[in-house]
Amino acid sequence: MEDQGLEQLDKPGGSRSIVPYIIIALLTIVILILLLVFFLSPESITGFRNTIGLSPDSQQSTGVVGSAGTPENGDASTGTLELSQVDSAGTTDRSDSAEQATSGLPGESGGTGAQGVSPFGAGGDQDLSCSELADNVETFLNTLDSRQYIKDFQLASPSSVYFPELIQKLVNNPPIVSGETDDLFTILQNTAHFFRIIGKKNILLLKGILDRERATFEQTLFDFYRLTKEPECLKTRFNLEIGQDPLYSYAGFFLNTMGGRLYLFRRDSMSRMVVNFYSILIIEQANREGRNKYGIAIKDAIDNLIIEIESSRIKLQMRDFYLDTLYDLKVKYQ
């Protein structure tokens, strides 16, 4: 009887032969779920072009061109560069201002920016009041209403109302920063965070703005970052309530999670560098105020961003300001 039982298990139809197929089926399902999330959350470029009427030729003509006339995707690889390649004279000059690393960051009261210089020249935008900063942001939003690609989206309200509401929705639903890799479901949630919270249409809308408004994107984001230090002003002018905790969560998301970093790698170089820069500033502020509850380290992020900015052919309007600030922080965290 025992021999007959063993023979049945060894037969092709036996229970042992089913186990490998079950395992393969489960692995296939997991892979399909991951692929589905990956291809749905970033939204196809083709859908974006069709939505805003951007042809391949026109997209090429509006792309950012580097200093040598090379398109954005011609950026030099940043992974193989070493910090020792940085010009020694430039490094020395920036290191001399290390004492201003904590007091000269944008948006800090009494500060005037790294090395005491406005990103666009002395006496520039660093001196603007809360009301003037809000005016700049509102002007940018009002300008969007005149763009044809924005009109094609048929927004339910003016940009000055629609986008603050969109931002508030993101603020009210921050991503998971700690314990992301504890289970597969959390990884999937983070990978598709923006897709889940604001949906495909709004992601395509934001992509259109990043692609078409490069000339004013950096200054507008700089002004908005400084407005986050003025919660009353944000509430009065834009009906926005943005606490430091949600900002910290999103900064940690972009710098320290698989989902956040994967999301940035799918974006264009300029957006990735600028978002990483402000994420570093937010974590730096949390360090100074004792709010870095997840212990997010920024030393490597600072080094990597310096390398990426210096090796990139993208013409960042505030490039010198970014590098001056990052080198100050590099000295502080070395």
Image (spheres, rainbow, N blue to C red):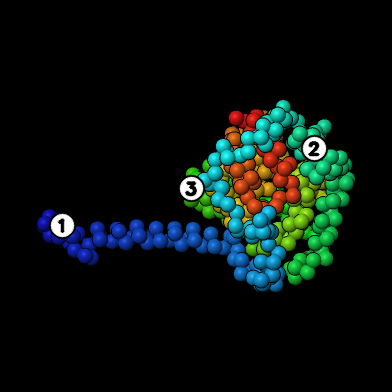
Q: Nearer the viewer, residue 90 or 166?
A: 90
Residue type at mark 3: give it. Answer: Asp
Disc with the residue nearer the chain's start (1 vs 2): 1
* Residue 320 image point, x, y percent: 72, 42
Which element carries disc 1, helix, strand or loop?
Answer: helix
Task: Name the residue beneath numbered marker 3.
Answer: 183
Disc with the residue nearer the chain's start (3 vs 2): 2
Q: Are marks 1 and 3 in contact (CB under 8 Å)?
A: no
Q: Nearer the viewer, residue 238 or 42?
A: 42
The answer to whether residue 24 is seen in the rendering is: yes
Residue at the spot 60% in from the left edge and 54% down from the top edge: 75
Q: Nearer the viewer, residue 239 or 1?
A: 239
Mark 3 vs mark 2: give the one in front: 2
Residue type at mark 1: give it. Answer: Leu
Residue at the spot 84% in from the left edge and 39% down from the top edge: 122
Q: Quadrant of residue 107?
A: top right
C-alpha span from label 3 to label 2: 46 Å
Mark 1 vs mark 3: give the one in front: 3
C-alpha span from label 1 to label 2: 82 Å
Residue at the spot 73% in from the left edge and 57% down from the top edge: 214
* Residue 262 image point, x, y percent: 56, 52
Q: Quadrant of residue 266?
A: bottom right
Residue type at mark 2: give it. Answer: Val
Q: Is residue 163 above or below residue 234?
A: below
Say few, some or many: other residues with alpha carbon within 10 Å of mark 2 (under 14 / 14 to 19 / 20 or more).
some
Q: Is residue 235 above or below residue 155?
A: above
In the rendered view, does 40 fall on the left or right side of 18?
A: right
Task: Name the residue beneath numbered marker 1.
Answer: 6
Which element carries disc 2, helix, strand or loop?
Answer: loop
Task: Name the residue beneath numbered marker 2.
Answer: 117
Which image quarter holds the C terminus?
top right
